[in-house]
Amino acid sequence: MQTIKLGPTGPVVPALGIGTWAWGDKLFWNYGSHYGSTEVESAFRATLEAGVNFFDTAEVYGFGESEKLLGQFMKQAQQPVQIATKYGPAPWRFGGQSVTDALTESLKRLQIDQIALYQVHWPFTFLMNQSTLMNALADEVQRGRIAAIGVSNYSADQMREAHKILAERGVPLAVNQVRYSLITRQIEANGILDMARQLGVTILAYSPLAQGLLTGKYTVENYQEPTGARQWDSRFSRDGLQKLAPVLHLLQDLGTKYGRTPAQVALNWLIAQGGVIPIPGAKNAKQAQQNAGALGWTLSDEDVMQLNKVSHSWRS
C-alpha cells in the first residue's frame, strides 16, 4: 500500500482517501432517494477491503449524519480506521470554547477519542480571528484529541498565516484541503501548491474527478442534458464537454494502456504530483473499488507530461 505522511510529523495514511460528503447529505446528493445507509456501508467495507482506511468527513455533511454513519461502521470494522473531519467557523461561534465544543460533538458522533486530522472547513474569521482559532486547535493537540491540524480552502497567504501561528506553539500545519483535479489546476498557478511544498503541508485534493467529468461517463458522444446541480456547471454542457474531449480521450487511451479506467488514471496523476492525496467520493462498493484501483501502479513520466500538457489551460 502506497502511504504518505500528513505534513512533516502527522499520521501516515494511504496515498488515497475517501470523501464522505454524500454519506447522509440530502441537499446536494439526495441521500435516501437512490441510495442510503446500506450502499454507503458497502462502500466503507469495500474501501477497507482494498486496503484504504482514510476517510474524510465534516460536521456539516448531512448535518452530522456522515460522522454518525462512520461511527457506526467503525464499530463493526476489524481494522484501524483513520478519520479526518472538519470544524465549521460559523458566525455564531466565537472564542476557543466553541472549537472545543464542536470537537467534542464530532468525537461523540464518530464514537472515538482522537481524530487523526481536524481541519478548519473555510477561512472565515467572523468574530474569531485566526490566532484564537489556531491556538484553540493547538490546545486540543496537546490534550491528545487531535493528532494533526489542517485547513481547507485556504489561500497561500492564509495558509502561511495559519502555519506561523501554529509554529509558535510547536505544532505543524499538516494539510490544506483544496479543489484539485486535471481540470481544476488553479492551485498550481495561484501559489497554493508552491506554498504547501515550501511549508511541508500536504494537499488533500477534493473533487479529484470533477464531479464525475473525469470518469468518462459524460462525453459529447453520449450527451444528455445535465440535471440537478450539474445543470449550472458549464463544463457539463455540450460545448464544455467538447472542450474537455482531448483530456477525456487521453485518459481513455492511457486507461487502455495500463488496464485501468479513466478515473483511475486521473487519480493516479494527482498522486504522481507528490505530496497530494486525492479523496474521491464513493456512494457504493463499486465506486469504492474503482477508486482503490488508482493505487498500486504508476504513470510513466512521459504519460504525466502528456496529461499536464493536454490539461494546461485549466491552470487558470
Image: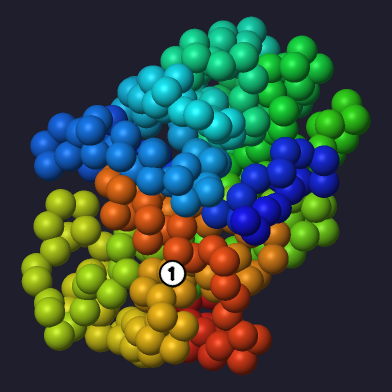
In the picture, residue 35 is in which quadrant? top left
Q: Is residue 290 left or right of residue 174?
A: left
Residue at left 39%, top 39%? 45
Q: Is residue 170 left or right of residue 292?
A: right
The location of residue 70, given as percent across then percent down, is 42, 27
Residue at left 57%, top 80%? 299
Q: How many marks?
A: 1
Residue at left 34%, top 43%? 43
Residue 95 to residue 16: above or below: above
Question: In the image, what residue type sits under mark 1?
Answer: Gln
Residue at left 47%, top 42%? 48
**Element class at badge 1:** helix
Q: Is residue 278 left or right of residue 236?
A: right
Q: Is residue 160 left or right of residue 300?
A: right
Q: Is residue 183 visible?
A: no
Mark 1, residues whose alpha carbon is within 10 Å: few (<14), some, or many (≥20)?
many
State the residue position of label 1: 264
- The foreground one among 190 and 293 is 293
Question: What quarter of the picture does the N terminus occupy?
Answer: bottom right
Q: How is the image coloured?
A: rainbow
Residue 316 to residue 209: above or below: below
